[in-house]
Image (cartoon, coloured by chain):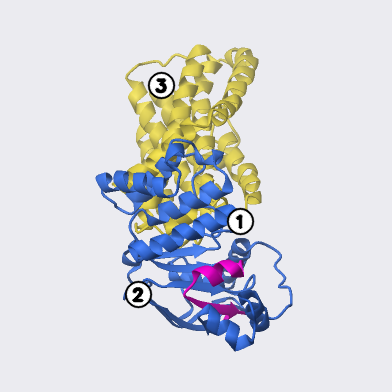
Amino acid sequence: MIRVEHLTKTFGEIQAVRDVTFEVGMGEIFAFLGPNGAGKTTTIKMLTTLLRPTGGKIEIDGLDPSTQQNEVRKRFGIVFQDPSLDDELTALENLELHGALYEVPRKTRVERSESLLKLFELWERRNDPVKQFSGGMRRRLEIARSLLHVPKIIFLDEPTLGLDPQTRNQLWAQVKKLNEEERVTVFLTTHYMDEADRTAHRIAIIDHGTIVAMGTPAELKQQTNSDSLEGAFLALTGNTIRSESADSAQSLRNMAQMWRKKR
Amino acid sequence: MTTIYVLWLRQVKRYLRSRPRIIASLGQPLLYLLSFGFGFGAIFAKAGQGNYIQFLAPGMIGMTILFTSIFSGIELMFDRQFGFLKEMLVAPQPRLLLMIGRTLGGATTAIFQGVIVVVICMLCGFRPTSLLGIPLAFGYMVLISVMFTALGTAIACSLSDMQGFQMVMNFLVMPIYFLSGALFPLTNIPVVMKFFAAIDPLTYGVDGMRSALIHQGVFGELVDIAVLGGLTLAFLAIGARQFSRIEA
């Protein structure tokens, strides 16, 4: 479903992603883990057509995102690391807008909006502006929105960041249910290792822009003689705290700005 | 067309739901109209220029549309900051349609504001010389609003943070407003000011509205329409080009 070969992205002097290669099968839950600034979000942005790779090849459902952008975009849904809802619009209006942008026929989008809002327990609040929603409700709405156009793949970039344990558990349970019932391929990133351990079929660990290990959670633990995925993660990426002066989205923008200046 | 419509509707809904924004953006034209209109009215009349409120009203309408349009375009920066831009950029739609939808939505909100200021001006004593000029003045309002929303979008695509917004206001929007002849007649001014007025896009909008509403234009309606039409297309093209290159 996703094939990445020798993927590279540079911003001026900074090499954010270096020679990354992996494959994700249909119906698989694939976790892409790494410390802050490792290259996770940059990779997701390239997979989702938001950034052009500097080198390498990407295939999404057999299509090339650099030449078949809109066809690729129809095939995936995405929940970004930062919120991306319109706070002034209601939950239903956010879904309606998304459905129209993805050319979902009106009747289908009305029916699907209702079923998704019910699935994510937001139907009662459908006519409330999103600015009145809690963090967990917003995240649930973003996942519902990403599924409205019936994508084959869903990208979840740290979807549980800042959520309480109850909401996180509920959210992952819903993601697993979707994966099992609708065979949606899930590509996720998270800093919560226990979540990745419980949810993902396979995991890739990226550090300094390079994949340092890949396998099932059990394989990674065995490979590093660790009891937990967190232990395996630390064994593979070290204990040094990564310095990040800004949040990853901002640092990416700064890098992009620098890149534009250099050009 | 659906893409353009839904993004237009989004902008309009956001505007109508933000009452503080509507009220706040009317404060400035109202203040200018009352202080300048009534404050300088007597001097203006003594200088043989006629009724200052009549003269000032098209300038106030132009000012309101200028500020609202530029702000609507620059709202793109808020979309970037608060994440909605990414939702638009991953949608399977040509960026040109996304840009046109946003621009028309922003322009519509600017026209709403402009119409409210027309009503305020009339309450302050402004009277159009002929009713036939009103549809033509509305046409100028549409051109000004689309032109400046597209300019705002182009600027927002190039700015990386909100601090740049104040710079745009001080070094672009305020000079555009003050040099446009919104507050004073363009006849009998120094050559240097005449030059800056001539290269100011708003000058032709204010002049066109003045010509349509009170028959006091300087350049002639053909010139006004040609310049505004040309600049609107140019700014739309620049805005579309900048938007097509934007990264979330």
Q: Residue A136's x, y, as percent? A: 55, 49
Residue B180 in the image: above or below residue B120: below
Q: Earlier in the sequence, mark 2 or mark 1?
A: 2
Question: Magenta span has A204?
Answer: yes
Where residue B127 appears, x then y in whole percent?
A: 44, 13
**Foreground label between 2 and 3:** 2
Front residue of A234/B73: it is: A234
Drawn colour of chain A?
Answer: blue
- The kind of residue tagged 2 is Asp
- Colour of chain B, in one word, is yellow
Element assignment for label 1: helix
Amino acid type assigned to the residue bearing label 3 in the image: Leu
Instruction: Give residue A30's position: percent from left, percent from top.
Output: 47, 73
Q: CA distance from mark 2 to mark 1?
A: 38 Å
**To which chain does the residue with label 3 belong?**
B
Kindly report the distance in space between the C-alpha atoms of the residues bearing marks 2 and 3: 56 Å
Residue B222, by quadrant, is: top left
Q: Chain of mark 1?
A: A
Q: Residues within 10 Å of mark 3 (few under 14, many from 20)?
A: many
The region drawn magenta spans A191-210
Residue at point 58%, 53% (across, down) = A166
Q: Which residue is mark 3?
A: B213
Q: Which residue is mark 1?
A: A165
Badge 2: chain ID: A
Residue A60 is covered by the magenta coloring: no
Q: Looking at the image, which is closer to me, A36 or B213? A: A36
Residue A218 circle label:
none
Q: Which mark is residue A64?
A: 2
Q: Secondary structure at mark 2?
A: loop
